[in-house]
Amino acid sequence: MLEATLTNPLLPGKNQKRDDFILQVILAHAENNLSINKAFFSENTKEFGNTNIQQILANLGINYFSKIPNLEGWLNKQ
């Protein structure tokens, strides 16, 4: 995951390595747990609210939330 961040980052920019590494770890975990419901919460919509990133998360069954009430609504439905 660290190697992917350094060689093929999903988030552009040299200052995005920390967030990219977080994203790489989340994606790797999701790939190994396809059968469970997954959610990711971050108010960092600059990086994680990007349409391309949201699509990557959705492709692995990850529900992305940037607002606590939306996450709470999702959790209450589980």
Image (cartoon, rainbow, N blue to C red):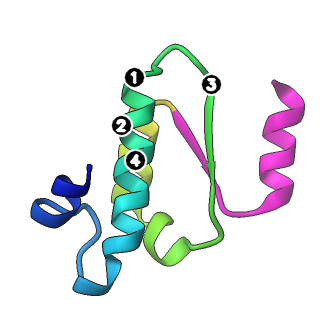
Report if the CB atoms under discs 4 and 2 are less than 8 Å apart: yes
Q: Estimate the x, y position of residue 9 in percent, counting from the top left.
A: 20, 63
Residue named by callout 3: 37
- 5 relative to 60 in the view: left or right: left
Residue in view at x 13 percent, y 59 percent: 8
Label whose residue precedes the other's in the sequence (3 or 4): 4
- How far apart are the alpha carbons under marks 3 and 1? 12 Å
Which residue is labeled 2 in the image?
A: 28
42 on left or right of 33: right
Identify the residue shown where x is 79% and y is 38%.
74
Q: Residue furthest right?
A: 76
Residue carrying label 4: 25
- The residue lying toward the viewer, choosing from 6 and 52, is 6
Q: Give the alpha-carbon distance from disc 4 to disc 2, as whole Å.
A: 5 Å
Identify whether 17 is placed above or below 36: below
Q: Amino acid at mark 1?
A: Asn
